Amino acid sequence: MEVQGRIKMIDETKTYGNNGFRKREVVVTTEEQYPQHILVEFVQDKCDLLNSYSEGQMVKISINLRGREWVNPQGETKYFNSIQGWRIENLQQENQAEGMPPVPPMEAFEPADDVNEEEHDDLPF
């Protein structure tokens, strides 16, 4: 699964326990009619994937949903979900020429309907 949106917040890497478990969280705000603020956690060596990203960037994050069961001291069973990221991609084009508008999608171009197939042209395709 994937989550796509603008980075709202990137937390620092935190280490837990004696084994050195590492976790880093990022919040991505989706761009839809009702924007959602989605918390995605990166764990262990995946924490370093966030080093080259900053707040405000448009990204696509590949995620896995994780769920776990926990029984509290009173014997009640509780369930928890987490969203775990394993890949992140930048959706902004860094090398776009200044002042150059972005290329519109293919749907923006109308098909040519006045083409004469029998007319000779010198194009190789």
Image (cartoon, rainbow, N blue to C red):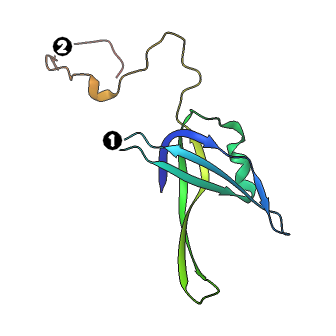
Q: Is residue 85 above or below residue 56?
A: below
Q: Is residue 73 above or below residue 30?
A: below
The residue carrying mark 2 is 119
Looking at the rendered image, the disc whose residue lies closer to the viewer, 1 or 2, is 1
Measuring 53% from the left and 44% from the top, which residue is drawn there?
28
Locate residue 46: give its quadrant.
bottom right
Amino acid at pointer 1:
Gln
The spot of residue 39 in percent (x, y) is 55, 53
**Secondary-structure class at tag 2:** loop
Q: Earlier in the sequence, mark 1 or mark 2?
A: 1
Which mark identifies residue 33? 1
In terms of depth relative to the viewer, which is nearer, 61 or 97? 61
Number of numbered discs: 2
Measuring 34% from the left and 27% from the top, which residue is drawn there?
105
Locate residue 90: give its quadrant.
top right
In terms of depth relative to the viewer, which is nearer, 60 or 110? 60
Dot 1 crowding, Cα within 10 Å, few <14, some 14–19, many 20+: few
Residues tagged 1 and 2 counted as in contact (Cβ below 8 A):
no
- Apparent side of residue 50 relative to residue 39 in the rendered image (left or right): right
